[in-house]
């Protein structure tokens, strides 16, 4: 690496490290079960939820407990299950069309990394509908809050990875993101913090 580039990178990293305690990141709050999600959605006045998942998760019936909890609480939902491995910008745009046409105001990403990536990118597109994902490459490009999420960011939250497209993969960081809700939190995740 060239010395001037190395100097620039180290200076940038040091500045971010110093600024980190002052950035408005949310403290993680972990919910214990899908049974708690309707209460959180009700408190945040969410009228309709879009569940972003993939066909494998849907066919395996893993979303049934979440669907049951939402139905029993009278919270309407729609399911976008067309997420593919390494989701594309077309996936995100299709999910965004569904989010808007169904009148949703909350997103739940359910499943593995691809579903999470699609849900997070969808949240970013909802927050900044006029900007493409490519224009949001980098750090702190999304300053608006994203749609309500029943789960706050995890302590080891990774930067947003935008879905694949003809261009190379790029990182998107934002101060508020949407994260997954699973049927039951794995046993290694603490129930309270």
Image: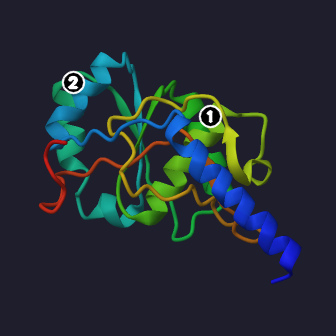
Label 1: element kind: helix
**Residue 126 has which mark?**
1
What percent of the width, then of the height, locates residue 43? 29, 17
Disc 1 crowd, CA 10 A, few/some/many (<14, 14-19, 20+): some
**Residue 63: x and y, percent?**
26, 51
Left or right: 6, with 47 as reference point: right
Asked if residue 82 can be seen in this view, the reply is no
Relative to 146, residue 11 above or below: below
Above or below for 44 versus 16:
above
Instruction: Report the residue at 19% width, 56% height from top.
Output: 189
Locate the C terminus by quadrant: top left
**Residue 152 visible within the image:** yes
The residue positioned 56% from the left and 69% from the top of the image is 86
Which residue does the numbered mark 2 point to in the structure image? 39
Residue 120 position, x and y percent, is 52, 48
Q: Name the one closer to the observer, 73 or 191.
A: 191
């Amino acid at each position: 690496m060239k010395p001037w580039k190395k100097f620039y990178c180290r200076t940038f990293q040091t500045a971010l490290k110093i600024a980190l305690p002052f950035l408005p990141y949310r403290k993680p709050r972990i919910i214990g079960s899908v049974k708690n999600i309707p209460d959180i959605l009700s408190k945040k006045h969410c009228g309709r939820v879009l569940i972003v998942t993939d066909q494998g998760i849907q066919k395996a019936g893993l979303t049934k407990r979440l669907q049951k909890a939402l139905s029993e609480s009278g919270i309407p939902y729609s399911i976008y299950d067309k997420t593919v491995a390494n989701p594309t910008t077309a996936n995100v745009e299709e999910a965004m069309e569904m989010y808007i046409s169904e009148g949703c105001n909350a997103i739940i990403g359910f499943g593995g990394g691809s579903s999470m990536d699609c849900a997070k990118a969808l949240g970013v597109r909802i927050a900044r509908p006029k900007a493409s994902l490519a224009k949001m490459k980098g750090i702190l490009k999304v300053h608006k809050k994203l749609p309500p999420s029943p789960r706050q960011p995890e302590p080891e939250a990774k930067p947003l990875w935008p879905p694949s497209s003809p261009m190379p993969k790029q990182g998107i960081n934002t101060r508020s993101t949407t994260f997954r809700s699973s049927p039951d939190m794995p046993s290694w995740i603490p129930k309270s913090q």
